[in-house]
Image (cartoon, rainbow, N blue to C red):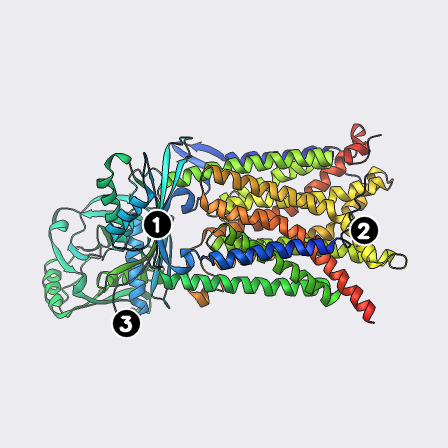
């Protein structure tokens, strides 16, 4: 057998412990007044709405008329700007053009004391109020999660003077134009009704060189400067050559056009389905599941150590590592894996994968035990135990991997099935599929690589070279 | 090391009878109770409140029905629910609306204020609510069925590839019989415990399928290995017994640890009154046991019976 050096055990064990500790607690530092997160811990996990509390709702146009996809986009823009306006940052928002449906899901914000889900749903789906106002005075400004500045609440003249309203706009569309020098530029074309054209002509004549700001509800969405009086009801919002600083991109131009169209929508949004979870229920569920996880881990650890002795103890270390990997894969500990919303079934998936993950250790340890009982030495028992168990371990995992992937496909937000069935919010089960998958991968890393390194290394210690410790008979 | 010598093959009829009996009981319950689909699939509404003090569920249901104008309202009470702070003096009431349609947001809102004014001192609070449009429910249901179908096809392909070496079509077929057995029993757990079928059901069924298949494969692998070594001197049934006894402890140990893990989740879920967890964990517990049982006591003896019959006919 190829020898593994004695210190290897301590190195692997130290890596596992370090991973377990950092993946649980995270590594945080201070940079002046700012907390800096170097590695994310359990605290930084994004919890699903079944834990953090939150709202899920689907809206549909309350009209019998034909609804175009552009109108659905506009309606989505309303919902999105409401979410931002309410400081809700980690929302999921989907549209299903086939069923004319907008689906939103967002967790309750931590620190929010006033829990009123019905009002929250009403607020984000209420008919949008679009206004064009003189100037761009505002009461407050803040920075949203993406680093963009959000201006709120018109003030002064801006509050007093409304030039146009949503129903004055016939349509807004993003376009790509070319100026005289051949530079490309994204612009937004506004078409107004004829009454609006007169009002707008008057206002633009008065405000040449000044600003007319565009507001959705309480948020300023654009503040263009008037270049010249516009009398034909066809205005163009420009922003400079594409690619230059502050200019529209294809995405931002269509976003703004959607928002303006939203204000001109001929229908209101009706809440079709909704579900709400209070944060208190979620919190107790979380502590309950954490408790369940710890108890399950301890019970399994006791079982493994009593039953398999040294390989059992190594298995417990590996399970610890596996659990830490699962947590790390959820929290976004590794930079290359995005953080993942964890739900109650997701936690159940982590616990279940601990129970199932024991399998590969049991297969290996049983094989070693069998070989020892045939009278082999520890070294050769380990070697054939490892060799003979690998195919069973792969078999034992692959079907669960298939199932986990299917669960993610079905309950995930966008996937091959949503092409047929339309988008949906991510169900709580999505998280279960993910943690099950991650648990199996972690189990494989730990159960095959780490556990073997540790066992081989341990077998090099004189004091541990007793068959009994590896599952053999007591002499 | 002590060796197990359980006569699996000779006792196969007992195993088959046991499974049939359980399935019969399940069918019986299914006929009596019918199959309940969760509002996730059918559409409908459920609201859960917490409160303090005493509440008569029927009276409350009648009040809710009158306030919302919805018929067929039922209310169910859970007392002394544990919460995060360890306080357990809160009670929960779950109101279900019949009629399989979504409840208006407006109605839910006005219901809350009506409750607050009728029971001012009982500190009612909204815990969770769910209101599903029937057409969305139906789409979701079909999507789930499609998923199960895709999983079944993939598993069968996997079984077909994997079993080419072990025993060919008959082995694969028997493995599938065992899987159907597992799914049936998991389904009956939902029926017997009156758990409406929901997305957890799909998750449990798929997980148990994956879990049970690999158990069966490990056993068949052993049978193949022993068959190669001992074909000359032993009969197939005794090779089966030998193989099963060899893998028995591994199968059982793994099932035990998985069972312990999921049972802990179930018990804690029960203590804290988390139906979303218990309705998921209970069928999973049963599924883990059944998955292990069916691989050892159903799939393997069936396979040998088939081979024996083939040998006799030849």
- Residue at mark 3: chain: A
* Corner quadrant of residue B125: top left
Camera-near label (3 vs 2) is 2
Q: Which mark is residue B74?
A: 1
Q: Secondary structure at mark 3?
A: loop
- Residue at mark 1: chain: B
Residue A372 at x, y percent in the picture: 83, 40
The Cα atoms of the two marked residues, 2 and 1, are separated by 56 Å
The correct choice, above or below, for B48 with respect to B213 in the image is above
Identify which residue, B26 or A8, lies in the foreground.
Answer: B26
Residue A212 at x, y percent in the picture: 17, 56
Q: Residue at the location (69% across, 62% down)?
A: B174
Identify which residue, A263 or A425, lies in the foreground.
Answer: A425
Q: Which mark is residue A66?
A: 3
Which residue corresponds to mark 2?
B242
- Asked if residue A8 lies left or right of residue A106, the reply is right
The correct choice, above or below, for A151 with respect to A3 in the image is below
The Cα atoms of the two marked residues, 3 and 1, are separated by 38 Å
């Amino acid at each position: 057998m190829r020898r593994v050096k004695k210190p290897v055990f301590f190195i692997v064990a130290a890596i596992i412990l370090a991973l377990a500790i950092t993946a649980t607690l995270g590594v945080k530092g201070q940079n002046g007044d700012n907390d800096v997160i170097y590695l994310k811990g359990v605290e930084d996990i994004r919890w699903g709405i079944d834990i953090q509390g939150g709202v899920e709702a689907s809206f549909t146009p309350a009209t019998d008329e034909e609804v175009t996809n552009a109108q659905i986009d506009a309606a989505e823009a309303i919902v999105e700007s409401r979410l931002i306006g309410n400081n809700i940052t980690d929302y999921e928002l989907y549209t299903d053009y086939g069923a004319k449906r907008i689906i939103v899901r967002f967790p309750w914000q931590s620190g929010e004391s006033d829990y009123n889900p019905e009002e929250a749903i009403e607020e984000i789906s209420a008919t949008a109020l679009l206004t064009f106002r003189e100037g761009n005075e505002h009461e407050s400004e803040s920075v949203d999660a993406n680093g963009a500045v959000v201006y709120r609440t018109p003030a002064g003249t801006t509050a007093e003077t409304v030039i146009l309203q949503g129903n004055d706009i016939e349509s807004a569309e993003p376009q790509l134009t070319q100026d005289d020098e051949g530079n490309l530029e994204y612009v937004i074309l506004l078409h107004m009704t004829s009454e609006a054209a007169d009002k707008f002509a008057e206002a633009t004549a008065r405000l040449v060189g000044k600003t007319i700001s565009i507001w959705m509800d309480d948020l300023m969405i654009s503040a263009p400067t008037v270049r010249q009086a516009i009398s034909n009801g066809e205005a163009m919002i420009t922003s400079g050559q594409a690619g230059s600083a502050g200019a529209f991109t294809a995405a931002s131009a269509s976003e703004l056009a959607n928002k303006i169209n939203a204000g001109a929508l001929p229908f209101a949004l009706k809440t079709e389905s909704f579900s709400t979870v209070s944060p208190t229920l979620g919190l107790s569920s979380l502590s309950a599941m954490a408790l369940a996880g710890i108890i399950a881990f301890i019970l399994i650890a006791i079982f493994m150590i009593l039953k398999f002795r040294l390989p059992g103890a190594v298995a417990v270390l590996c399970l610890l590592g596996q659990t830490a990997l699962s947590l790390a894969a959820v929290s976004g500990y590794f930079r290359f894996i995005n953080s993942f919303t964890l739900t109650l079934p997701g936690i159940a998936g982590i616990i279940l994968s601990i129970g199932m993950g024991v399998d590969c250790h049991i297969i290996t340890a049983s094989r070693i035990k069998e070989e020892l009982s045939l009278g082999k030495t520890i070294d050769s028992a380990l070697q054939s135990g490892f060799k003979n168990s690998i195919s069973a371990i792969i078999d034992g995992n692959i079907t669960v991997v298939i199932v986990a992937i299917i669960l993610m496909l079905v309950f995930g937000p966008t996937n091959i099935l949503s092409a047929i069935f339309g988008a949906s919010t991510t169900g709580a089960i999505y998280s279960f599929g993910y943690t099950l998958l991650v648990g199996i991968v972690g189990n494989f890393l730990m159960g095959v690589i780490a556990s073997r390194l540790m066992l081989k290394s341990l077998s090099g210690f004189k004091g541990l070279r007793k068959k009994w410790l590896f599952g053999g008979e007591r002499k | 090391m002590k060796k197990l010598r359980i006569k699996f093959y000779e006792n196969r009829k007992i195993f088959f009878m046991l499974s049939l009996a359980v399935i019969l009981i399940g069918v019986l319950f299914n006929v009596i109770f019918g199959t309940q689909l969760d509002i996730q699939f059918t559409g409908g509404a459920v609201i859960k409140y917490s409160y303090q003090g005493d509440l008569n569920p029927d009276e409350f249901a009648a009040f809710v029905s009158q306030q919302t104008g919805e018929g067929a309202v039922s209310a169910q009470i859970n007392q002394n629910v544990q919460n995060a702070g360890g306080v357990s003096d809160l009670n929960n009431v779950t109101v279900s609306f019949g009629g399989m349609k979504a409840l208006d947001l407006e109605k839910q809102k006005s219901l809350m204020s009506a409750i607050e004014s009728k029971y001012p001192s009982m500190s009612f609070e909204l815990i969770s609510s769910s209101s599903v449009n029937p057409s969305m429910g139906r789409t979701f249901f079909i999507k789930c069925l499609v998923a199960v179908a895709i999983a079944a096809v993939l598993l069968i392909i996997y079984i077909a590839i994997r079993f080419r070496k072990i025993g060919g079509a008959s082995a694969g077929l028997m493995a599938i019989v065992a899987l159907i057995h597992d799914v049936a029993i998991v389904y009956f757990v939902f029926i017997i415990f009156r758990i409406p079928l929901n997305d957890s059901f799909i998750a449990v069924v798929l997980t148990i399928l994956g879990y049970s298949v690999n158990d069966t494969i490990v056993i068949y692998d052993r049978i193949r290995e022993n068959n190669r070594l001992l074909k000359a001197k032993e009969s197939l049934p005794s090779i089966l017994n030998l193989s099963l006894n060899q893998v028995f402890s591994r199968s059982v140990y793994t099932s035990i640890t998985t069972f312990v893990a999921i049972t802990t989740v179930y018990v804690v879920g029960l203590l804290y009154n988390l139906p979303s967890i218990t309705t998921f964990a209970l069928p999973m517990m049963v599924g883990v046991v059944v998955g292990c049982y069916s691989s050892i006591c159903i799939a393997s003896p069936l396979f040998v019976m088939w081979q024996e019959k083939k040998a006799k006919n030849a």
